[in-house]
Image: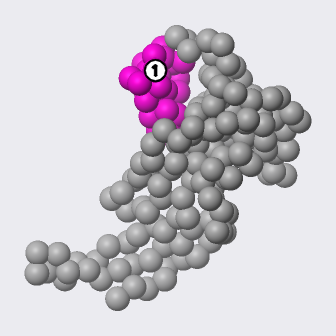
Amino acid sequence: MSRLIYKGKVFEVRSEEIILNNKKLYRDVVYHPGAVAILVKHKESFLFVRQYRHPAREKLIEIPAGTLEENEEPYNTAMRELIEEAGIKANKLDFLTKFYVAPGYCSEIIHLFYTDDFEIVENQPEEEEDIEVLWIDIQKAYEMVKNNQIKDAKTIIAINFYRIHFG
């Protein structure tokens, strides 16, 4: 059994009855269409955006990211979000990995992409977005993760993925 608790613009919350170990249990689940995040490298720097995140009550430093629109492929979302948020038109995007954000209560999966092959164009932020574009030296980014200056999980995953596989 599934009961809709809340339906918003981006996600919905349902209360669901499940059977686990022959016991009837209830779980609240946030259903999210999924998202993308893109690690952009130029020479010895990564591209970041700084924007206010209300649940955190602060501006966070993150890699560009965005939510999949209905029936949109993650690759196309990534291309769109790069232009919108950062004014980057990727000539090529490489898929790196995908991961759950918080599988204990949320269905959201983030598809992580990488590019170092792009052109700079005019960004096209959505009306409610106030985004600052930053280029940060890779070694400094590693230090910012270590010192808790970068607090966003998808960004930490992307930086560490790069460090492990390419760095």
Q: What stretch is highlighted in magenta?
A: 141-167
**Residue 97 place in picture, x, y as percent:** 45, 42
Q: Which residue is drawn at 49% across and 32% down?
A: 158
Q: Is mark 1 on a helix, strand or loop?
A: loop
**Residue 153 place in picture, x, y as percent:** 47, 38
**Residue 44 place in picture, x, y as percent:** 62, 12
Q: What residue type is labelled 1?
A: Phe
The answer to whether residue 162 is above or below residue 5 is above
Mark 1: give few (<14), some (14-19) or many (20+) Cα within 10 Å. Answer: few
Residue lying farthest to the bottom in this orientation? 1
Q: Which residue is drawn at 71% across and 45% down?
A: 79
Task: Please name the residue that numbered disc 1 is placed on.
Answer: 166
Q: Quadrant of the C terminus?
A: top left
User: Does the magenta-highlighted stretch encompass residue 79?
Assistant: no
Q: Which residue is drawn at 52% across and 23% down?
A: 149
Image quarter of residue 123? top right
Residue lying farthest to the right in this orientation? 122
Image quarter of residue 49? top right
The answer to whether residue 54 is above or below residue 141 is below
**Residue 2 place in picture, x, y as percent:** 39, 85
